[in-house]
Amino acid sequence: MYHSVDRCPDDPYRITVTPERLDAHLARLRRRGLTGVSMAELLRARAEGRADGLVGLTFDDGYQDFVDNALPLLHRHGCTATLFVLPGRLDGDNAWDPLGPRKPLLGAEGIRAAHDSGMEVASHSLTHVDLTRADDEQLQHEIAGSRSALVQLIGAPVDGFCYPYGYVDARVRDAVRAAGYRYACAIDSGPLTGDFALPRVHIGQQDIGVRLWLKERLNKARGRTLPTAGSPSTGAPCGHVSRETATRARVSRETSAGAAADPRSTSNTTSDLRGTSNTAAAPPRTVKP
């Protein structure tokens, strides 16, 4: 899971990778005989038994730098990706992040450009709120409303959803399914893991060498929890991934990966999750109450 692709020294949430780092990640992916694809393509391939060698790439939030910096690199390496955007914040910025710089978001023209260039455009809700705290009316507005807005904007079906902050419970998952989506991405989705709570792994600027190798192992482990093609994929009938549990797990993983990484290593790598998503658990994000 990527977010922003830019040069940004002030990055308190560690959501930014430089174009050079993304280029190196994609190059390594291709050297290993792997191809980055959108989540829709990955799930179709999995259902048809041809997902070996494919890696799901996702970019959350829909920053302007996706079109400026990431898109040319994806094309150069023969990859596609899923771009999760916020149709309620067109031409806005990441106002939900209280710290760090304001990063401009794509407007309608940029989102259409990404779609027309072969990327999958999917929903990250309307405005990037914690859906587990939303009442029923707001939940419907953020989930179903964002899908309707994107269908109208790009003139094509919108199959994918991504939970803001990775926060999901059974109520939110069921609302996504009822809105007509075909899949949804989370982070560490626990007992809800399935096609409507797909686990991902965060890939950041510091992910090189041993640190990235450890995330590859984490990605493979999460992939083994997914249902196989043709089996039920709705996740557990009940359960909740709490903010506290998700945050503790992310802090533990980031700390472990950082401690184990070899600072002398200069090899640039990217996650390898064959047949599941190569995306990532974002570091803890401060949410206003």
Image (tube, rainbow, N blue to C red):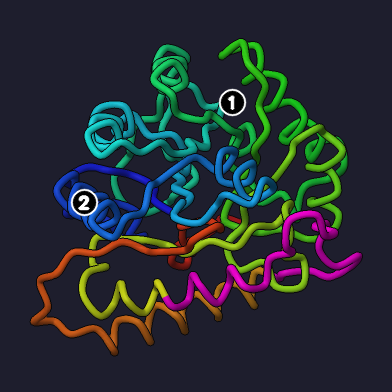
User: Horizontally, is 78 left or right of 120 in the view?
Assistant: left
Q: Mark 1 sits on what residue?
A: 88
Mark 2 lies on a secondary structure that is helix
Q: Which quadrant, please, contains the N terminus?
A: bottom left
Is 176 a magenta residue? no
Q: Residue at x 33, y 44 (%)?
A: 4
User: Horizontally, is 76 left or right of 252 in the view?
Assistant: left
Q: Amino acid at mark 2?
A: Ala
Count of numbered labels shown in the rendering:
2
Classify 123 as above or below 167. above
Furthest residue in direction right, as rendered: 237
Q: Residue at x 25, y 80 (%)?
A: 210
Most prominent secondary structure in the magenta stretch? loop
Closest to the observer, 279 or 164:
279
Classify 172 as above or below 223. above
User: Horizontally, is 12 left or right of 161 in the view?
Assistant: left
Q: Residue at x 29, y 45 (%)?
A: 101
Furthest residue in direction front, as rendered: 49
Closest to the observer, 111 or 125:
111
Q: Mark 2 sits on what residue?
A: 27
Q: Quadrant of residue 212?
A: bottom left
Q: Amino acid at mark 1?
A: Gly
Mark 2 and mark 1 lie on one chain; the one further toward the N terminus is 2
Classify 155 as above or below 251. above
Mark 1 lies on a secondary structure that is helix
- Residue 9 shows which numbered tag? none
Q: Residue 202: x, y in percent? A: 42, 62
Is 223 a magenta residue? yes
Q: Which residues are magenta?
A: 217-242
Closest to the observer, 281 or 73:
73
